[in-house]
């Protein structure tokens, strides 16, 4: 259900900005030596700087980028801006106050930097000289600015603002200001971690000769739809044309029940002069077919061949080509299927035609950018547990450009600072042994000729002080004869003659890859630092191994994917350093569901379980979750349908709560009460069942956290509770 753990950083930025402005203390970079540790600890993990947004100057000579620093003591964050030269020199901190500064971009052909700051008491757009001086406030809006994008000619700016929305949750009575009740009339009344009483709209504002922007015009004026789309969308869901006359934007123009069961978002072109809007995804006169809201959309008319050209699934993140002739975007084919393969769609503006240029890449496109020739697109995607760089031409010829045991997290072009007329790529990259850093890539014709150079060294001092365990790929045969890739993470100072307690890691999603990700909670190096071997399988249902492998999970949550988990851990037990008598099983979201299910089906393999935000009772989950499309697609049917498919019947019959009678192993249940994706009652139910059954159990509940844990002290509490529980049962 969640696609990437990197988004947690962006969420923390948004939720903690106002708090940082009210404090006097500046939270800055921590001296790694002061932590006085040689292995990863929760405190070391939270002390690391977290690189987020970045942007190259027009001439390619400088990059401005954002870093977040966190204080466990003060339980908050501080976000600052740096510049750095293309060769890694002249690294300069631009922030000298406790104000949060985020989302930097270059404007005025590189003469100034625009960014969001709370220096005026609210989130507004500011500008400054590249050396951090001459700060000026561009917007002075009565509303916070949640994001912005300046037009290429510098005369206009898109401003993202949050507006009141009362179509589903009715407005309160004026004479009852202290009433806390909400009158709700339809679905989609809450999303991710909040009640939907406001939505984001993009405004187009004019910038005057002094660099001041007005309040602007709402391009969705009078429409009850959101743009960008909650909960994770940002300004990447909008784009300016090169002539600054047109905006491409992403929107799912549905509300209530229709919104809750559908993933059908489209790409629209908005003419800033005529204020006319055109849908690039749907044909003129398109009418939505009738649907049954209690059944999967997979087999309904909306996903039939009749509508194959109507882009019925997620369409997001448009980008114009440099010549202005094309718009490209990320496109999923089927309505209701949030994990459908993400393809790269190219729309010819003059011809009004669409083509898909990554069809030969049988995995997800995670991010992309146009080359300046308007004929080539660079993209990143996962294959065999690593996210690498590829390119494609307009005919769909895909070429791999990197083959690293790392994950690239973003890609954008940067003018070559050394070769006139050429371009390089500015990219972020991380692995299981390194958080995000920025890199400059010079793309070649293939893997052998592509050059990669690390630009930033935000956390190098930490890596020098800390000893990490090796990360090794291991292939094994599944119960049905397929090849299964697992990552094996070894403890620091590994001794091959010792036997170590070992953890099976169960991935979430259910279709999120076990790639070379770096997490500030589910961090494999901190698990290894606590003396554990980690086994992290790319079981059935994960991208990067072809569509057939990935789609095997839908309607079969407790089938082959669970056999793959047991195959992986049984194979690991043949390793001489794995202690098969001290095995634990841990996971979050779908991984938490997996833990609850395996607790009743592990044949005494495991001595301890930990489930974070896992689904426990699938009948309850069907109507509890706010995104109904997920349950509809994955389960086939509502539980009350008498004509349920055999897959639906199997799903409900194999819900973990039906096998508590077989539970016999200590279990820790963790949940956030603001988690509306998988409600906290799932965690309560599992913990209560375990205790009523007489099984040793603990419940860690966070009243103020959602599907993730974002606050520093909560994060440290999570880590301490996690390892205290494992140590209690696996290190006796």
Image (tube, grey):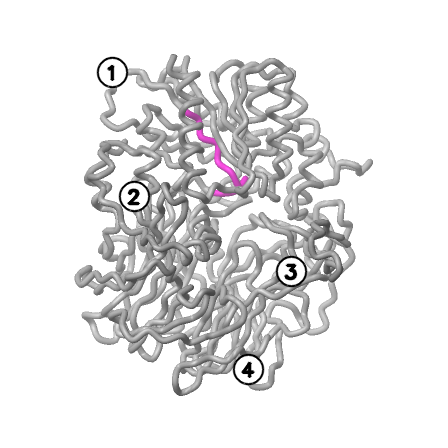
Mark 1 and mark 2 in contact? Answer it, CB < 8 Å.
no
Secondary structure of residue under mark 2:
strand
Secondary structure of residue under mark 3:
loop
Disc with the residue nearer the chain's start (1 vs 3): 3
Pick the front one: 468 or 487? 468
Pick the front one: 624 or 98? 98
Disc with the residue nearer the chain's start (2 vs 4): 4
The percent coordinates of residue 314 (x first, y second) are: 58, 57
Query: Which region shows up in magenta?
Result: 503-512
Name the residue that disc number 2 marks.
434
Q: Does the magenta portion include 504?
A: yes
Inter-mark Cα distance, 3 to 2: 42 Å
At 62% across and 39% down in the image, what residue appears? 679
Mark 3 and mark 2 in contact? Answer it, CB < 8 Å.
no
Disc with the residue nearer the chain's start (4 vs 3): 4
Name the residue that disc number 3 marks.
308
Q: Which mark is residue 272?
A: 4
Name the residue that disc number 1 marks.
497
Q: Nearer the viewer, mark 1 or mark 3?
A: 1
Inter-mark Cα distance, 4 to 3: 31 Å
């Amino acid at each position: 259900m969640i696609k990437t753990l990197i988004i947690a950083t962006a969420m923390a930025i948004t939720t903690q900005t106002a708090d940082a402005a009210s404090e006097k203390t500046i939270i800055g970079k921590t001296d790694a030596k002061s932590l006085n540790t040689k292995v990863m600890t929760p405190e070391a993990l939270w002390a690391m700087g977290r690189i987020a947004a970045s942007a190259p100057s027009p001439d390619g000579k400088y990059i401005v980028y954002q870093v977040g620093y966190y204080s466990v003591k003060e339980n908050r964050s501080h976000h600052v801006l740096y510049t750095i030269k293309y060769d890694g020199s002249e690294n300069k901190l631009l922030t000298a106050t406790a104000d949060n500064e985020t989302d930097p971009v270059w404007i005025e052909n590189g003469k100034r930097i625009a960014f969001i700051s709370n220096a005026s008491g609210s989130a507004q757009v500011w500008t400054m000289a590249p050396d951090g001086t001459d700060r000026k406030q561009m917007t002075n809006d009565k509303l916070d600015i949640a994001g912005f994008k300046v037009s290429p000619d510098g005369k206009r700016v898109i401003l993202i603002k949050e507006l009141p929305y009362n179509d589903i949750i009715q407005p309160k009575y004026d004479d009852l200001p202290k009433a806390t009740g909400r009158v709700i009339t339809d679905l989609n009344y809450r999303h991710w971690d909040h009640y939907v009483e406001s939505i984001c709209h993009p405004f187009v504002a004019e910038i005057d000769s002094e660099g001041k922007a007005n309040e602007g015009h709402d391009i969705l004026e009078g429409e009850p739809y959101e743009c960008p789309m909650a909960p994770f969308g940002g300004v990447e869901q909008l784009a300016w044309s090169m002539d600054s006359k047109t905006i491409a934007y992403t929107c799912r123009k549905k509300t209530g029940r229709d919104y809750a069961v559908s993933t059908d978002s489209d790409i629209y072109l908005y003419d800033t002069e005529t204020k006319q809007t055109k849908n690039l995804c749907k044909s003129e006169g398109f009418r939505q077919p009738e649907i049954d809201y209690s059944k999967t959309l997979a087999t309904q008319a909306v996903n039939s061949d009749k509508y194959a050209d109507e882009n019925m699934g997620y369409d997001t993140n448009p980008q114009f080509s440099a010549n202005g002739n094309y718009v490209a975007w990320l496109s999923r084919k089927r309505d209701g299927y949030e994990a459908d393969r993400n393809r790269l769609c190219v729309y010819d503006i003059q011809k009004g035609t669409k083509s898909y240029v990554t069809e030969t890449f049988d995995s997800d496109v995670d991010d992309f950018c146009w080359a300046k020739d308007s004929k080539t697109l660079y993209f990143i995607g996962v294959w065999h547990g690593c996210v690498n760089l590829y390119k494609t031409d307009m005919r769909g010829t895909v070429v791999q450009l990197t083959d690293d045991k790392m994950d690239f997290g973003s890609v954008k072009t940067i003018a070559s600072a050394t070769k006139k007329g050429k371009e390089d790529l500015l990219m972020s990259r991380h692995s299981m042994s390194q958080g995000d850093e920025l890199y400059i890539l010079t793309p070649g014709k293939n893997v052998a000729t592509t050059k990669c150079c690390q630009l930033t060294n935000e956390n190098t001092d930490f890596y020098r002080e800390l000893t990490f365990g090796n990360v090794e790929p291991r292939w094994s045969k599944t119960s049905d004869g397929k090849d299964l890739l697992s990552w094996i993470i070894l403890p620091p100072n590994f001794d091959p003659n010792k036997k170590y307690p070992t953890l099976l890691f169960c991935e979430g999603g259910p279709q999120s890859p076990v790639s070379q990700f770096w997490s500030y909670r589910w961090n494999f190096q901190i698990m290894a630092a606590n003396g554990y071997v980690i086994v992290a399988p790319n079981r059935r249902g994960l991208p990067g191994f072809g569509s057939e492998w990935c789609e095997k999970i839908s309607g079969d949550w407790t089938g082959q994917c669970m056999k793959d988990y047991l195959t992986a851990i049984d194979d690991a037990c043949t390793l001489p350093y794995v202690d098969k008598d001290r095995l634990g099983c841990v996971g979050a979201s779908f991984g938490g569901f997996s833990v609850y299910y395996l607790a009743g089906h592990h044949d005494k393999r495991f001595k301890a379980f930990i489930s974070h935000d896992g689904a426990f009772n699938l009948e309850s989950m069907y109507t509890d979750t706010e995104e109904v499309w997920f349950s509809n697609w994955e389960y086939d049917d509502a539980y009350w349908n008498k004509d349920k498919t055999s897959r639906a019947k199997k799903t409900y019959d194999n819900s973990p709560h039906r096998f508590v009678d077989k539970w016999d192993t200590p279990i820790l249940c963790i949940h956030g009460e603001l988690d509306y994706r998988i409600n906290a009652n799932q965690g309560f139910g599992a913990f209560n069942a375990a205790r009523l059954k007489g099984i040793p159990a603990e419940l860690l509940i966070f009243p103020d956290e959602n599907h993730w844990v974002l606050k520093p002290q909560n994060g440290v509490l999570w880590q301490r509770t996690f390892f205290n529980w494992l140590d209690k049962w696996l290190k006796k």
